[in-house]
Image: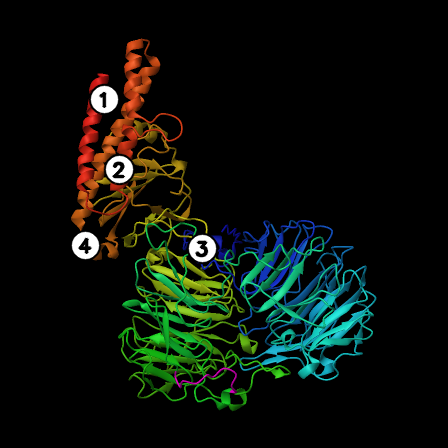
Amino acid sequence: MKTLVRFLSISTFLLSTTLVLAQDFSAFEYRTIGPSRGGRVTTVTGTPVLPGTFYLGASGAGVWKTDDYGTSWNNISDGFFDTPSIGAIEVALNDPNIVYVGTGSDGLRSNIISGKGVYKSIDAGKTWDHIGLAKAGQIGAVEIDPTNNNIVWVAAIGDAFKANEERGIYKTIDGGATWEKMLHISNTTGFADLELLPGNPNVVYAAAWKAQRTPWTILSGGENKEGGIYKSVNGGKDWIKLETGLPKGLIGKIDLAVSAVDSSLLYAVIEAPGDEGGVYKSVNQGKTFVQTSSNKGLVNRPFYYTNIELDPTNPDIVYSNANPLLKSTDGGENWTMMAVPHGDNHDIWINPNNTDLLIQCNDGGANVSHNGGKTWSSQFNQPTAEIYQVAVDDQYPYWIYGAQQDNTTIAIPSSAPSGTSAQGTQVMIEVGGCETGPSIPKPGNHNIVYNNCKGRFSVYNKITGTGREYSIGASNIYGHNPKDLKYRFQRVAPVHVSPHDPDVVYMGSQFVHKTRNDGVIWETISPDLTAFEADKQVISGSPITRDITGEEYYSTIYSIRESKIKKDLIWTGSNDGVVSITQNGGQTWSNVTPKKMPKGGRVESIEPSQFNPAKAYISVDRHLLGDATPYFYKTEDYGKTWELLSTASNGIPSDYTAKVLREDPETAGLLYAGTEYGMFVSLDDGKVWKTFQQNLPVTPITDVIIHRGDLILSTMGRGFWILDNITSLRNSEITNLKDAPILFKPDTTIRYRTGRASGDFPNYPATGVLIDYYLPNDLTNDVKLEILDANKKSIVTIVSDSTQLKSTSEKIEDMGLSMTFTYLDAKLETKKGLNRFTWDLKQKGAWSDKKSRSFKNGPMVPPGIYTARLIVGKQNLEQSFEILVDPRLEKEGITNSTFIEQLEFQNKVINLLSEAIKFQVTLEGELKKSTNSEKKALLDTILKKLKNAEGAYPQQMLIAQISYLSYIIGDADKEIGKDAKERYSELVSEFNLLKNESAF
């Protein structure tokens, strides 16, 4: 899958030019590894002018576009949008280059990401401008006047978590330069939808919705005066409320549809109590309505779904996006289910020129149909997964685990899992549990995975594919009033394996539970460690629709961590703002909540220090309470006192809600913080934060883990990302980059044999040693990188294209079969600042008459100690590093002597191949200049034995045979076979005979 990503220089807003010489992170870059499976998409659209072009707007992944009917998707909002949450997309009818996007998804889940206003593109999404309404919150609809694409309407739902005056209907007549609020009801009632009358865009319908989320309930709807349908016939100057035939009492979320072929027809799907909820139809532009259906499938979970659309050519064909996707062919009276690739449906767009061509979206992505919904395009080509947490196992290479919102748990490899892995192909497995997670592989046995699924604990065996459930309390808590529950579990209840004993597993309800035998026996080792306010223990979903999935269970434990350096020292954090500690394995507990911390926040993460047992870090999220402020704290006295690490001026913006904070396991004071809108790093224990966004798209960072020198992230909308090798960050010199070049010590590298590197998706790199270096100035010459073996013998020298390799190229051509190996690589950058080069572990290969290929693709060097030497002008900087054997090979019995013997034999074959190729070039030169017919005949005869003839399927001659031997002896780490050795002797003899025949 082609994934085009365009990044704005967001990573520079804290790195001004005055700091470049003091600190530089520019060489660090994340790579995306998937999964390639789609996540929640809340809006889709197309354009009849370009039938293969569609847009999707995800809840946490921004705007994506396809030009090939959904075969491939490319992100087009990265680098332009301040939020990845999309509420509505509209393409101008008379110009497909004009696109407006309203941010802020309208499906108000607890993990919804705030909107940041409206964006406009005049080049079909290549570039974007922010055009206002930054505080409008979630945007339910955008409509473009079909007669003038500078006239645009917006329905603003508002802030999902608090009252705000920006709720309302907005209009611009100058393409977004200015906006006017055309309709406002109150600071708690916004608008979920609006429609323009076909043929007369001055007639406008708007659907008012009172909505707000809290951590413990969903508020959707209110008294009739707080909601309903409004109409204007004069471009929004005046409004009337449409009431005849509509519900008179409580009224909730509403979505509207106006027929494109009969403007008298107006449909509305309405959240209302009991049988009043359902679809209503007006045949007189809203003067009167008649309910056509009270089918519960139309309004099940209305705060999340509620979308109605009409066939653009037939007003009797109606679609309802909810759970499931329903279709009516008789004007909304009877409904049948439509099959789509995934459930939880949100939007649909039908091409008016071909109603069999449509796009639909759901919690699994966006899918295109060419046959009216009988079959659909794939959702495995859009890496927009919302992942709740991240965990890793101890395989080689390691695998990454998490749970995908409204999908399965997943495990995917960090790099190509084997030397024969197909590049560009996603490898993914399910590992038990369900969408909420976490999924934690057991240390020492990655085939065992501990899972939570909405409060239910299970143990999954990857070998048998069996999950054994051992839920605490053995009771299904789904749909219960939390006040009646013995154990209250959040949907994402924490599961934590003791770092001191892999058989000890902790899980949190309002209590801490512990098992020593995979859940067969649980013991409760704590009292209630939450704030437990009785008035927050309520049935979620009011005043109309009950909705109890566990997301709103309040006063539960949200994070558990046992110290890695002090057994039985356990920290917990609740989702109502309580931090607790035990130092004796649960015998006694203390409430150590920061005294100045605002109440009620969700303690998203706890990080016990790996250097000081009295020290710990927490991240607290209060965005569900209407407070987007990031709260990161540190204690150094077991929680007696706390220091706020995210002040108004030390680097993290005031609305970047805290998600996760982790400490580097090797360098004290090196901290990584994930927020609602990206990554930050501190090199001084939280005193100052620097953006560490690099090439990451803007999306919430839900979890961070550091493993084998890599920084691994999970995101709420863009899957997993890895920043390989953070060794240089751990070096104090990175804080003091001045006037002298610096070569950072490369990290220890495991020598994997993998398939070819894939820069596409997923991004699986080939094995390489990452070498970071700092240059104080831009240089065009005098920069070289040399790799030396343990005896300080040069293996390879790399120069940049900016250093002009002309003289070196001459040297290469003349150096025959000596072991000196110098080649040009443009990736050896010579720009000012921090640079990174990846050495592929390859030594000298065979000679070629083509300079670009000569001596390339040699065998991998064996495990051992090596030295990197950076030559900058007259300065030589050296750092040693180690290359380790693949642990899987050690289990096979491959020893160091195997590597050495194999390499010696490979070099012999390579030398033979080089000699043979040079011999061919020499003969061809002689043939060209010779005038002796007998000599030319002889040379021609020898050349035919030496090289393959032209054409299809030629017989493989001597050089091809030597090349084949070189290939088969170097395809894996192994003992050289007897036949290969004998074949080498035969080839040497054949070559010597040809040389003797030629008399050269």
Point out the tag, 2 or 1, that comes first from the N-terminus. Answer: 2
- Please state the extent of the stretch shown in magenta in the rendering: 472-481
Point out the tag, 3 or 1, that comes first from the N-terminus. Answer: 3
Residue shown at 66% from the left, 65% from the top: 133
Q: CA distance from mark 2 to mark 1?
A: 20 Å
The residue indicated by pointer 1 is 994
Local crowd at mark 4 within 10 Å, few (<14), some, or many (≥20)?
few
Q: Are marks 3 and 1 in contact (CB under 8 Å)?
A: no
* Mark 1: amino acid: Leu
The numbered mark at residue 893 is 4
Q: CA distance from mark 4 to mark 1?
A: 41 Å
Taking the image as shown, residue 461 lies to the left or right of residue 605, namely: left
Residue shown at 39% from the left, 46% from the top: 776
Point out the tag, 2 or 4, that comes first from the N-terminus. Answer: 4
The numbered mark at residue 966 is 2
Expressed as whole percent of the image width and height from the top left, the position of residue 886 reads 26, 54
* Mark 2: amino acid: Ser
Q: CA distance from mark 3 to mark 1?
A: 65 Å
Q: Is residue 736 above or below residue 481?
A: above
